[in-house]
Amino acid sequence: MNFPEKLEQKLTQRKETQALRELGVQSNWVDFSSNDYLGFAKMEIIFDKTHQFLLENKLKFNGATGSRLLTGNNQLYTNIEKQLATLHRTEAALIFNSGYDANIGFFATVPQRGDVILYDELIHASIRDGIQLTHAKSFKFKHNNIHDLEEKIIHFTKDKNQEIYVVTESVFSMDGDSPDLVTMAKICKKNNAYFVVDEAHALGVFNLGLIQKLQLENAVFARIITFGKALGCHGAAILTSKKLQQYLINFARSFIYTTGLSPHALATIKIAYNELLTHKNKEKLQQNIQHFIAESAQLPLPFIKSNSAIHCCIISGNQQVKQIASKLQQKGFDVRAILSPTVPKNQERLRFCLHAYNSKQEITNVLALLTTFVTS
């Protein structure tokens, strides 16, 4: 079969820069790469309770049968969205099939022609993709730089006919760091800007998220949460006002034109939240985070400062960082290299994801090996 020459050239370029992506298989290595921060994805009690819940409520269906605006909606959706709104102290919640769908739906739909989106330069690809679909103007501000953000907001507030949306993540997926959310919220309020925060990597790691930990619920226009990370299941939700919920139901194409989640997927979200509220794995995870921070601080390695479950060691060059990741994997530790163009050139890194089920000895051992491989 013929293959387009332009596509062939792009694949060749990826190979030449050591950046070609390939699908791998699960291993028995010590997990320092998955987003299963609390171990919920593998937790049998969640699986068993979900199954029992479906049986007790006579929900023996394999699929949703259609989009939520047609036949795919059910009482379970409504109940869980009410549960989410109550737990997250917001007016309403709207469930999407994934975090990607939620961000595409929001940013392609909410900001209007003539409006301005100000986004952190390291914002997630799903948000960037949503912004590309909007008719609003968009400008990036320097990563976690309050001064640069405020200057840009002041510049654009001169035009009273446009709305301003300020977008950030509470925990950045590739750096693991966090912005000064309190100050950002104050700046947005002062300048009548709409504050939007993606909490994908904060939910579960910081209980119900950093926005609630900092009591900023009323300062945020919309929060995006995902269930495929610390909650160990699938789907996402936008936490917002009832008015915006209604707007998204009517205009968000990634919500309207897709089959709904299966009853099993929805029930798993419900049970995972029940476990989140009571399980001790949150405390275990925090202990491991503090242990990693203390151990890595003693090493001559360029780690990005982070208080989350994500910790990154900068090792420039795709080939070099891949080689060190391979050496760690050969020793039984699943640590993955993050390559450019996923991150900027010369900012390639090893990304360590910490979990409640990692032992302190495993953390100590992998850091010792990393030091040996980097400095040898």
Image: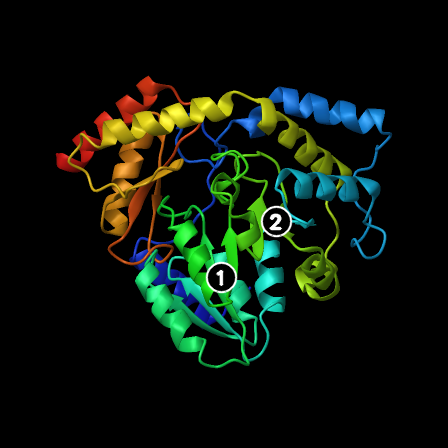
Of the residues shown, which amino acid type is indicated by label 2? Ser
Residue 57 is left or right of residue 137, and the answer is: right
Q: Secondary structure at mark 2?
A: loop
Q: In this rendering, is residue 313 above or below 3?
A: above
Q: Residue at x 49, y 26 (%)?
A: 282
Q: Which quadrant holds the N terminus?
A: bottom right
At mark 1, the secondary structure is: helix
In which image quadrant can residue 80 be found?
A: top right
The amino acid type found where label 1 is placed reads Lys
Q: Which residue is mark 2?
A: 98
| Circle 1/circle 2 CB separation < 8 Å | no
Q: Where is residue 296 drawn, in percent x and y? A: 24, 31
| Figure colour scheme | rainbow
The residue depicted at 46 percent of the width and 23 percent of the height is: 283
Quick check: 13 left or right of 201?
left
- Which tag, 1 or 2, sits closer to the chain's start? 2
Between residue 217 and residue 311, name the one nearer to us: 217
Residue 373 in view (yes/no): yes
**Numbered disc in front, either 1 or 2:** 1
Residue 143 horizontal/vertical position (percent)? 34, 58
In this rendered view, identify the residue nearer to me: 298 or 334. Answer: 298
Quarter assignment of residue 363? top left
Residue tagged by mark 1?
189
Residue 190 in picture, x, y percent from top left: 46, 64
Cα separation, mark 1 vs mark 2, equals 29 Å
Q: Quadrant of the C terminus?
A: top left
Marking on residue 205: none
> How many residues crowd around disc 2 within 10 Å: few (fewer than 14), some, or many (20 or more)?
some
